[in-house]
Image (cartoon, coloured by chain):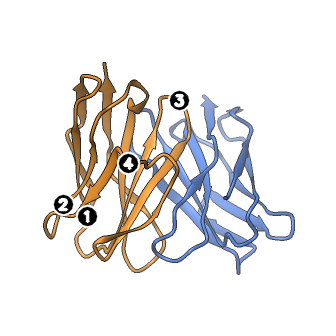
Chain colours: A blue, B orange
Amino acid sequence: GENVEQHPSTLSVQEGDSAVIKCTYSDSASNYFPWYKQELGKRPQLIIDIRSNVGEKKDQRIAVTLNKTAKHFSLHITETQPEDSAVYFCAASKGGSARQLTFGSGTQLTVLP
Amino acid sequence: EPEVTQTPSHQVTQMGQEVILRCVPISNHLYFYWYRQILGQKVEFLVSFYNNEISEKSEIFDDQFSVERPDGSNFTLKIRSTKLEDSAMYFCASTGQGETQYFGPGTRLLVL
């Protein structure tokens, strides 16, 4: 089955700096890659997603890049703010509406004021 | 904005007891999922459900687990005989026509 590796497990940055989180996946059939933000004790919330027919997607301060050949994708957060502090999970699936998400192990991002 | 809801928010049970976790997916969504997250670990897929039947299930989803959509709004996860290792946060999620899975707030299950 699919295996998703995520690095780093913890990341501390100064407010205003950029943060990058990287994930790799194993199943070349995976074609949908969402990123979720989870604050302590809360539900995972989708922040951005990308499909395999796209190499990059941006939404304000958040961007995701995908390298299908290397089977890795990354989350980039620019101009970080303290409220960006949370655990971020990458995930992968084969797409379609009834496909399980396989999650990475999560990255605890701390933005220092 | 519509949200997935779950009840109860917390459940404490004795080992060997049955528990039922309830979810109300977003109205007009057709695909439903259960995931679990053991404290401090990643979110793990349990089962997906569409058109009144299981679409996919993981190795975690053994004979002790079952899902049901008893009416037009609820989606339930039953654990027949709970074990200590079933202690986790259980998330329900739903999907409409697209691929985005919207998660509920979770039920924290503690098995003593």
Circle number at residue B2: 1
Which numbered mark, 3 or 4, is in the foreground of this view?
Answer: 4
Residue in the foreground of this view, choosing between B109 and A104: B109
Q: Tell me the element at label 2.
A: loop
Circle 4 sits on which residue? B63
Residue type, numbered disc 3: Gly
Where does residue A107 sit, x and y in percent of width and height? 64, 38
Q: Tell me the element at label 1.
A: loop
Residue in the foreground of this view, choosing between A72 and A78: A72
Which numbered mark, 1 or 3, is in the foreground of this view?
Answer: 3
Circle 2 sits on which residue? B74
C-alpha separation, residue under disc 2 versus residue under disc 4: 21 Å
Which numbered mark, 2 or 1, is in the foreground of this view?
Answer: 2
The quadrant holding residue A75 is bottom right
B35 displayed left or right of A12: left
Q: From the viewer's perspective, is residue B22 above or below residue A15?
A: below
Q: Residues within 10 Å of mark 1 (few under 14, many from 20)?
A: few
Mark 2 or mark 1, which has the lower sequence index? 1
Q: Residue furthest left?
A: B71
A83 displayed left or right of A15: left
